[in-house]
Amino acid sequence: MKKYIKILTVLAVSAGFVSSAVAAAPKNDTPTTRGDAVIFKVHDIVPVDNNGVVTGCDFTLSLYNRTSINFRNFTLNLNWEDSVDERFHFDRYMATIMKPEDLNKQADALPAEETAKPLSTAITINAFGANKHLSVKSHIDNEKCYLLLREAKFSVTPCDIARGADNAAAFNLGDKGKECTALFQFVSTDNPEYFGQFKDTSATELALQSQSEQNKELTEVDIVLNKIIENMGISDKTLSNIH
């Protein structure tokens, strides 16, 4: 009988250890999305060429409205800085590999240094309701399609929302033309959620819910095992008295 008690005790201790380990698990620093924002991403980027030369980029903009706000319309202004051009300049590179006398001879042939221009576009969205998903196809005239995969600076203005008792006052939004950038979140390729379909709940929230349910199940196992051990102890004592 005592052998069985030891086995159950080990099981109970193990369950308690697992439960404590799950509860004490370190927080994940992986980027996540907000549960109270209009999340959006740029994807399916396709270079458009003309006689073998890239002249533009086709892409898709996908949004998911997790807020309680119904938008009549808003304009999403996107801006990508060209950090590649800032780090690399052809004339500086040539100066490192050529002799000074040769560099002077070739100075006229080197291209003039140009200031990097950001890649920007503005997309207007009409009639976008709460808890809705939307994908729109767009185009930009620029050969630097790779920039669209990077983090973008953005603003949302003008922004016109449908007035309602449950949203205008809560979010402190003003009249037509009000900027509402704070209600939006850009999802870049650094965020694992970029590679899946947007849902009404973020991946982090789903993970926390799963962990909470697992902790609850482990706690219930602890209670059951402790009760069994308690009952087994009483039975063992009774049998000992009989013998």
Image: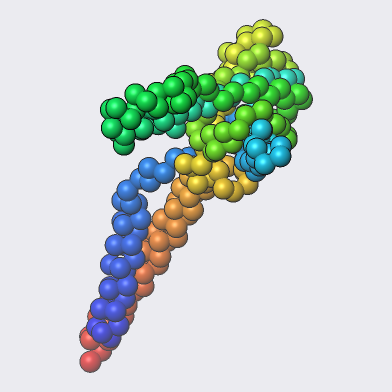
Asked whether residue 66 appears in the rendered view, the answer is: no
Quick one: which residue is furthest to the right in this view? 127
Q: Residue 243: image x %, image y %?
A: 23, 92
Which picture quadrant has residue 98? Answer: top left
Q: Residue 106: image x %, image y %?
A: 40, 27
Q: Residue 218: image x %, image y %?
A: 40, 61
Q: How many marks?
A: 0
Task: Identify the residue shown where x is 64% and y is 37%.
Answer: 54
Frontmost residue, 192 versus 1:
192
Which picture quadrant has residue 227? Answer: bottom left
Task: Identify the residue shown where x is 46% and y is 47%.
Answer: 208
Frontmost residue, 226 versus 63:
63
Frontmost residue, 15 versus 129:
129
- Vertical side of 212 occupied by 148: above or below: above
Task: Identify the residue shown where x is 50% and y is 46%.
Answer: 192
Frontmost residue, 19 versus 68:
68
Task: Identify the residue shown where x is 28% and y is 67%.
Answer: 13
Quick one: which residue is furthest to the top in this view? 175
